[in-house]
Amino acid sequence: MKTKILLADDEKEFIEMLAQRLELRDLAVTTVYSGKDAIELAEKIDFDVIILDVLMPEITGIDALQQIKKSKPFTPIIMLTGEASIENAIQGMKLGALDFLIKPADTELLIKKISQARKLKHEHEERIRQAEIENILRTRGW
């Protein structure tokens, strides 16, 4: 099954080009152009990895990160920014961002980060499933 990616960035040309590069590597990419749309779509679809631009109008990537993490705490989020702001990076990491890359991010580096993020998410999900199984067995006395 293809890795499901959500890309959120208000720079349409950039995001469309990035989406094409990721799709050529057999990833299923959905694009949105605002933090608000990213939050709404993340609520409806279980993405493997979400990639958010830090600076977007209305709702910033940092705000979107915070909102998405409330409902999808195990979904890895990679932040992208055109401006290397240490403060944004620190804030994003504190709020649960997996990584923070400077635009334009090297495609191969981004693919590597996506692969690591997907693996991390699946490991979290597997630990949760194992805990649920152990809980069922314990409650039934097996």
Image (tube, rainbow, N blue to C red):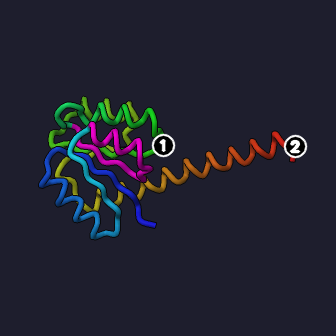
Residue 106 in view here: yes
Q: What distance separates the C-alpha of mark 2 from that of mark 1? A: 30 Å
- Label 2 secondary element: loop
Q: Which residue bears the numbered disc 1?
A: 74
Q: Which residue bears the numbered disc 2?
A: 141
Q: Position of residue 90 (x, y in %)?
A: 31, 32
**Residue 44 part of the magenta-drawn span:** yes
Magenta-colored span:
36-54
Q: Position of residue 72 (x, y in %)?
A: 45, 40
Dot placed on the residue nearer the N-terminal end, 2 or 1 = 1
Identify which amino acid the numbered label 1 is placed on. Phe
Q: Position of residue 59 (x, y in %)?
A: 24, 32
Please give left or right for residue 136 compared with residue 34 in the image. right
Q: Position of residue 67 (x, y in %)?
A: 37, 32
Q: Residues within 10 Å of mark 1 (few under 14, many from 20)?
A: some
**Residue 42 part of the magenta-drawn span:** yes
Identify which amino acid the numbered label 2 is placed on. Gly
Please give left or right for residue 104 compared with residue 24 in the image. left
Please give left or right for residue 64 compared with residue 115 in the image. left
Residue 90 in view here: no
Q: In which quadrant of the rendered view does residue 92 lie?
A: top left
From this view, report whether residue 87 is shown above or below residue 30.
Answer: above
Total numbered circles: 2
From this view, report whether residue 86 is shown above or below residue 29.
Answer: above
